[in-house]
Structures are given as C-alpha cells and as structure tokens.
Image: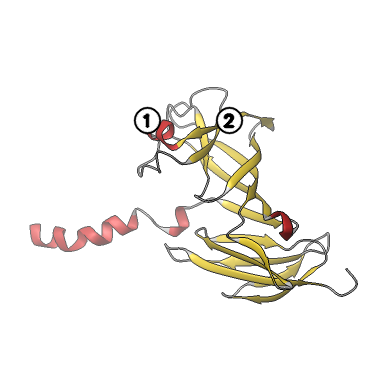
Amino acid sequence: MRRLWLLLLPTLLMAQFHRAEQDLEIHYWLLDPDSHQFRISHDFTVSKPGQKYVHSFVRKGSVVTKSVVIDLNTGKQLETSNVTGKSVNALGYYPNPTDPESVVVQGNLDHALAEGESVRVRVIETYTDPVGYSIKGDELVWDRTLGRPYDDVALPPGWMLTSVSVPAIITLDADGLVVCRFTNPRNDEIHVVLKARRRKGN
C-alpha cells in the first residue's frame, strides 16, 4: 500500500495545479512602439480568509505606471501603491515567494476577507519594456512569455500583423484593431514573438 501511494504521489501533486482552476484573464494593448509601452488588464478572484491586499507582480526589466485596481464586486477603485517583493512575501498569501527586490503593485481591500468570502478584482497598468517591445527596421516586435489559458493582444492603431511565432486566432475588435488570441491548455508558458508593420497610408 505504501508503494502504491509513492507511485501516485507525483500525479496527485500535479493535480493541484490543474489549468482549469486558473481564472486569470489577461488583455494587452500595444501602444506606439517608439514608447516601448503597452497597457495590460487582468481580472482575478481572491478568496483567502484574512487577505487584506491584492497583488500584481511586475516582471523583471519592466517599469509599471498608471496602476488602477478595481473591486469588480462593488465597482470601487482601491487605494494602490508599489511595494517590494519582500513585503509581499512577509504576508504569507502565496505558496511560492517572489523575488524580494522585485516591484509589486498592491491594492488595499476595504476589509480582510472572511471565511467563504471572495472578491473579483481588475488590475489595469501601463508597462514600459524596451527589451521585449521595440522597433526593428520597419517592424514592431513584441517578445513575451504568456502563462495563462487565454491571452488577447491588440496591435496599435494603423498596424497590421506580419508574423506570429505560435498559433493564434486573429480578429478585428470594435475599434478596428487587430487582436491575437492565444490559447494554452497546458500547465506551462508559451513564448510569443509577434511582428507587425504599419498599414500603407498610415
């Protein structure tokens, strides 16, 4: 019986990280590539009893500005600040610690969550990433790993897609922007390299 348990343990551990349990929705809007900036919006649910803060973790090499955190249950904009990874680790909310020197956007909930209570939040930010988003020749290049089940990326106005490194669903949104939707059912990340050129006449 003990041997059977040891054989099953890796499978049971993997089951704790099932992709279907993830509820984070992410949308990207690429801004003028000369600025190296893009806007990001992601929604997620928090339900840990006693949790008073929500967090958005900024990737190394990126600078975040214009952060807004909204409680979607009430529509209220939360008080927001940038904190260090060290201070977030001290809260004990997350199973895996983040880089103590990293930047984390923190939103303050109205109150600590009670047992069985949850809140859905939306984080909107502007990222500056001169390494991952730049102009090379006459093309913009957006190079980023995406780790969620669905990621939508909208090109800047007046730009057309020339290539993308992984399969995507290509559509036009209500404003006429080209949007790429990436789907990843696996428990890992996809590496996306997206290239585009200005439409003639723009």
| Res. 137 visible in picture | yes
Residue under the image location 45 percent in, 32 percent down: 116
Using the image as rendered, state which of residue 56 and residue 116 is in the foreground: 56
What's under tag 2, amino acid-wise?
A: Ser
Label 1 amino acid? Ala
Location of the C terminus (image quadrant)? bottom right
The residue beneath circle 2 is 81
Which residue is outermost to the left? 2
What x and y, as percent, mark residue 169? 66, 72
**Residue position for label 1:** 90
Where in the figure is residue 101, as x and y percent of width and height?
Answer: 43, 39
Q: Quadrant of residue 13?
A: bottom left
Pick the front one: 192 or 183? 192
Between 162 and 146, the one lying in front of the other is 162
Q: Disc 1 vs disc 2: Cβ atoms closer than 8 Å? A: no
How far across and how far down the image is residue 180, in percent? 67, 67
- In the image, what residue occupies the spot 75% across and 57% down? 32
